[in-house]
Amino acid sequence: MSLKRIAIVGAVAGVAAAGFLAYDAYIFDPCEIVVHQSIPSPDRKKRVIIFETKCGATVGFNTQASVASVSGGFSPHGNPSFFSMNGQRQLTVEWKDDKVVTVAIPPGDKVYRKDTQADDVSVEYRD
């Protein structure tokens, strides 16, 4: 077998192995998702989910928020967070209407993510 063919077979095998590992990590995520609050929109079609991801002793506490459908399930993979901060904090979330939500950020820990749009919902922040 030529060196070029061996390199191609090795590359294909490497990509396949990486794909399997990524799929395995997605399906068998070692982290636990703990939902603390679910705040429905006025029309009861969407909700803001306040949650944390627990990944063992080596990963610190966190507070996150996502928008999800009321009728469907929730997963951080399918409903990525629009807000995240270090530490376990109590977020105050209020819906202004069906398309605008306000989040009061508690003082203290570092904010990692602070998006102003989540799905078709606008997000406003108060410090």
Image: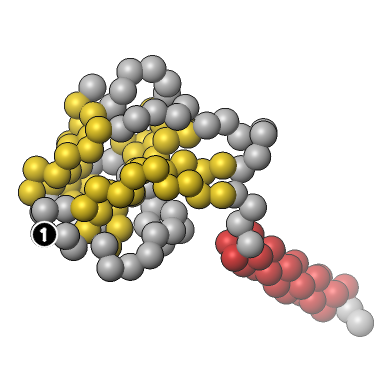
Residue 27 coordinates in the image, percent (x, y): 59, 65
- The crowd level at tag 1 (other Cα within 10 Å; few <14, some 14-19, many 20+) is few
Describe residue 55's horizontal placement relative to residue 49 as left or right: right
Question: Which residue is more in the foreground, 124 or 65?
Answer: 65
Question: Which residue is more in the foreground, 49 or 126?
Answer: 49
Colour scheme in use? secondary structure
As drawn, the residue found furthest toward the bottom would be 1
Residue 108 coordinates in the image, percent (x, y): 38, 17
Residue 15 visible in the picture: no
As drawn, the residue found furthest toward the top would be 108
Residue 43: quadrant of the picture: bottom left
Residue matched to label 1: 43
As drawn, the residue found furthest toward the right would be 1
Q: Residue at x 19, y 26 (%)?
A: 126
Question: Which residue is more in the foreground, 115 or 85?
Answer: 85
Looking at the rendered image, the quarter that the N terminus falls into is bottom right
Describe residue 37's horizontal placement relative to residue 8 as left or right: left
Q: Residue at x 11, y 53 (%)?
A: 42
Q: Residue at x 89, y 79 (%)?
A: 2
Q: Which residue type does callout 1 highlight?
A: Asp
Disc 1, SS: loop
Residue 93 visible in the picture: yes
Residue 71 coordinates in the image, percent (x, y): 28, 68
Describe residue 15's horizontal placement relative to residue 68 as left or right: right
Q: Residue at x 27, y 62 (%)?
A: 69
Residue 61 coordinates in the image, percent (x, y): 52, 32
In the image, is residue 36 above or below residue 121? above
Looking at the rendered image, the quarter that the C terminus falls into is top left
